[in-house]
Image (tube, helix red, strand yellow):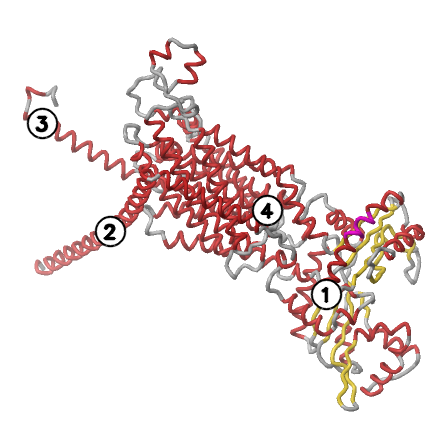
């Protein structure tokens, strides 16, 4: 028995020893990972410090090189400036089935075969002029026949009028009551189209462009002559003209925006202390971002880039990231010790700031680089992301070189006690006492009325003072936290509700100037001509037994629910009217070719049938019909649904067909194409954050960062949907930017919190806000102020840009200053182990003091 007990005791001791060894190994592995993370972080800090020292020792070089690059590339941008004129290439999905179907339809039924016919709008329109005449409320456009004919004659009498008249359709139609044949009683509007035959000739195309300009001017000239009619005109170049008009309208507003950002940067960088105030550095920081953007534009145009209006967002995107680096460097400079030489202070500021700024710049580059990848199916998004990648690289280079040199010169002036504005020596206190109060106020260096042993004079900055003395205490108050939790629940609810209502922005008027003729025309057309879809071509591209009753039934099922105009339908009506039977191939084709198609009223159907003759045998190898569907006011969404229903039928049915209309090129797979860039960018950033999960100093920093960025991104997405912003190329670019903007501002705050060694989470979040809150508030405030002039640009594109960027800045500010300071006090990381360590050190120190007192009872006071 004793032997068994001994064996059990020995076994339990061995198990306990093994468990201790496992715990020790886990502890050692964890310590090695922590040491690796610390070594990487210290290595990056050391590299950035050496970079700061190098810049501080050669400031003239780093000031001159960026300026010379800007002069070279900026001048080349003026000489190589080109506009993108192909709007379809820019905003339509690059790879889509609709473009393949268009090529197939064009090869079967070329444009010349449809010349002068009613349904030539199934082809790419080329050059055209379209006129919409609208009667006054309560009027009937059919009673204005004389005026309509006069306008029509004026168009046909235009110089170089190589046109084909097509009376298109009536709008706002009222039918005769109790009318069996649906007679029209009145119509509010009529739409007339004039197609130009340019024959793919450059000279003819130039003549056509001249005709279109003259056509639009003629409509403006004729409008005063017809008081009972409103004239709306549209030409092939109208969409491009009104798309580019946004850039012209926004020029002055962008300059105003720049002035506002400059004033905000100057004001937020100023202090009462004339020695430590840095207004010129705020000014130079904004100018640094401007000249880096000019250099990026020069490189873009040198590489044969073409300008389009979506690139208006780049100055705002670059400014939001660049000024963040500027204000962080200023905050890093304020945290350095004043008794150090200015070169060492610059190096310390670089060591403190440039690591995080480098990482966020890399994430910017990754996100927009993924957006510029071949996976992006919209050319406007791809071009924007390519330009943004260049801007980010140059932005980073100019911040550490050009602005770093400016910081060196400002530090040298501060060390030599020069005034931060007037650049003159600050007088002594004795001299100032003999001067008036206003002079003392202007020349005070902050030490005149305070102790010379003050630890941190930079704490007098008004934003830091506000955060330290007022805001930090208020936001961490226990009575405020429940209201913050309720606020976040409201924010999350509205965001979720908006995310369930997302709609794609395939409507191209979202990118046009809001008061342009194209938008006016589109709104009137949507109001009065939205009862029916555009004419959809139904192309059968294989030989078919049209005389077979089974085939006829299949065709009838496919066209069920549509208003159909078909040569086959008219042909069978013709056979029934003449009591003729054609149940075999020879009779069917013989009557079709020799009788039906020779009738004047049916001759236009020759363009809808392709015959083939092999020996003495004729056959139909392809044909087309026309479908029109009844739609609601949301015509585009209905057309997309029609397209999604008809395409699968072409794979299931025995009849091989395609459906096509030129508008399908802009709508086909648009929602997938436009959301793909933000999904790819989000995946890229998430992957980087997960891969670096065990390389950062504290993994919880990455975990909190992923949660925060997700919350901001979904918040912006949901709220912009509730604000009537569709998912078009501009809003998608803003969502990609939101990912980076939120990381740029939340990452330093979160990493400072998780690394803080204070006793409680509340103290840690206070120190984090005190360290980074000033730079975050400076940058977001400057960013939001700079958006205000966009409100006064009458363009749908700039409205979308303003709404999305305003939500981006506001949601980021809300998370940095309201949500995170409260939620971080509830959840990990815990700060108890720091308190235990400090208690252990204090206890050890007390024991040492007691030993010293016992050994030296006569020298207690010395101890």
Q: Which residue is mark 2?
A: 32
Mark 4–mark 1 contact, CB under 8 Å? no
Would you identify the image quadrant in which residue 570 lies?
bottom right
* Label number found at residue 201: 1
Q: CA distance from mark 1 to mark 2?
A: 73 Å
- Name the quadrant of the N terminus: bottom left
573 left or right of 439 in image: right
| SS assignment for the magenta stretch, majority | helix
- Residue 647 can be seen in this image: yes
- Secondary structure of residue under mark 4: helix
Which numbered mark, 4 or 2, is in the foreground of this view? 2
466 left or right of 232 in image: left
Q: Which residue is mark 3?
A: 852
| 728 or 448: nearer the viewer | 448
Q: Which residue is mark 4?
A: 498
Q: CA distance from mark 2 to mark 3?
A: 37 Å
């Amino acid at each position: 028995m004793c032997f068994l007990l001994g064996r059990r005791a020995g076994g339990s001791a061995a198990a306990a020893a093994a468990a201790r060894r496992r715990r020790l190994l886990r502890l050692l592995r964890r310590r090695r990972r922590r040491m690796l993370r610390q070594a990487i972080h210290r290595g990056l800090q050391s590299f950035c410090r050496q970079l700061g020292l190098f810049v501080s020792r050669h400031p003239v070089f780093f000031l001159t090189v960026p300026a010379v690059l800007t002069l070279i590339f900026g001048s080349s941008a003026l000489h190589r400036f080109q506009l993108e004129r192909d709007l379809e290439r820019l905003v339509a999905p690059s790879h889509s089935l609709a473009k393949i179907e268009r090529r197939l339809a064009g090869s079967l039924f070329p444009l010349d075969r449809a010349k002068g016919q009613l349904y030539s709008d199934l082809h790419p329109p080329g050059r055209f002029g379209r006129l919409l005449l609208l009667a006054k409320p309560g009027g009937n456009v059919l009673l204005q026949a004389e005026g309509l004919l006069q306008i029509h004659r004026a168009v046909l009498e235009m110089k170089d009028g190589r046109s084909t008249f097509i009376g298109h359709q009536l709008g706002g139609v009222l039918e005769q009551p109790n009318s069996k044949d649906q007679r029209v009683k009145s119509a509010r509007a009529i739409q007339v189209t004039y197609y130009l035959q340019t024959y793919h000739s450059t000279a003819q195309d130039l003549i056509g462009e001249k005709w279109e300009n003259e056509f639009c001017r003629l409509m403006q000239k004729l409008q005063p002559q017809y008081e009972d009619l409103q004239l709306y005109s549209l030409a092939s170049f109208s969409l491009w003209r009104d798309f580019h008009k946004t850039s012209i309208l926004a020029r002055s507003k962008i300059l105003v925006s720049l002035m506002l950002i400059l004033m905000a940067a100057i004001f937020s960088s100023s202090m009462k202390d004339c020695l430590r105030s840095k207004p010129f550095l705020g000014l130079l920081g904004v100018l640094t971002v401007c000249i880096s953007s000019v250099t990026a534009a020069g490189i873009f145009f040198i590489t044969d880039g073409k300008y389009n209006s979506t690139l208006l967002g780049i100055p705002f995107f670059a400014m939001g990231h660049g000024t963040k680096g500027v204000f962080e460097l200023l905050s890093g400079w304020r945290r350095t010790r004043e008794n150090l030489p200015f070169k060492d202070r610059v190096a310390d500021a670089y060591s403190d700031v440039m690591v995080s700024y480098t990482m966020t710049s890399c994430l910017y580059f990754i996100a927009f680089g993924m957006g510029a990848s071949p996976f992006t199916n919209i050319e406007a998004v791809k071009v924007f992301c390519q330009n943004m990648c260049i801007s980010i690289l140059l932005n980073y280079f100019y911040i550490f070189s050009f602005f770093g040199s400016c910081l060196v010169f400002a530090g040298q002036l501060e060390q030599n006690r020069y005034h931060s504005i007037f650049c003159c020596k600050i007088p002594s206190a004795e001299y100032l006492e003999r001067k008036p109060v206003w002079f003392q106020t202007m020349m005070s260096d902050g030490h005149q009325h305070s102790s010379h042993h003050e630890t941190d004079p930079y704490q007098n900055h008004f934003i830091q003072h506000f955060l330290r003395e007022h805001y930090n205490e208020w936001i961490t108050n226990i009575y405020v936290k429940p209201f913050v939790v309720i606020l976040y629940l409201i924010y999350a609810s509205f965001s979720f509700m908006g995310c369930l209502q997302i709609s794609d922005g395939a409507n191209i008027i979202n990118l046009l100037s809001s008061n342009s003729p194209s938008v006016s025309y589109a709104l009137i057309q949507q109001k009065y001509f939205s009862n029916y879809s555009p004419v959809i071509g139904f192309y059968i591209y294989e030989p078919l037994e049209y005389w077979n009753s089974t085939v006829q039934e299949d065709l009838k099922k496919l066209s069920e629910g549509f208003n159909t105009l078909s040569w086959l339908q008219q042909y069978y009506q013709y056979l029934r009217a003449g009591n003729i039977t054609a149940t075999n191939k020879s009779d069917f084709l013989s009557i079709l070719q020799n009788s039906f198609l020779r009738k004047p009223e049916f001759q236009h159907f020759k363009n809808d049938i392709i015959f083939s003759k092999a020996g003495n045998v004729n056959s139909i190898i392809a044909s087309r019909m026309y479908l029109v569907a009844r739609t609601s006011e949301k015509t585009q969404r209905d057309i997309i649904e029609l397209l999604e229903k008809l395409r699968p039928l072409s794979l299931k049915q025995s009849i091989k067909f395609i459906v096509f209309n030129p508008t399908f090129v802009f709508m086909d797979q648009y929602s997938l194409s436009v959301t793909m860039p933000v999904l790819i960018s989000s995946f890229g950033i998430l992957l980087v954050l997960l891969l670096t999960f065990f390389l950062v100093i504290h993994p919880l920093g990455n975990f909190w960062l992923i949660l925060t960025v997700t919350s901001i991104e979904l918040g912006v997405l949901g709220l912009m949907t509730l604000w009537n912003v569709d998912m078009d190329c501009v809003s998608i670019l803003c969502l990609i930017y939101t990912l980076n903007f939120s990381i740029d501002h939340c990452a330093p705050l979160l990493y400072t919190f998780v690394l803080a060694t204070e006793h409680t989470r509340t103290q840690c979040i206070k120190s984090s806000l005190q360290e980074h809150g000033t730079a975050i508030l400076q940058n977001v405030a400057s960013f939001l102020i700079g958006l205000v002039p966009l409100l006064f640009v009458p363009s749908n594109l700039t409205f979308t840009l303003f709404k999305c960027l305003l939500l981006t800045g506001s949601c980021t500010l809300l998370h940095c200053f309201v949500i995170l300071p409260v939620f971080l006090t509830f959840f990990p990381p815990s700060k108890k182990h720091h308190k235990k360590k400090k208690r252990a050190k204090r206890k050890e120190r007390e024991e040492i003091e007691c030993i010293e007192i016992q050994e030296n009872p006569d020298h207690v006071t010395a101890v």
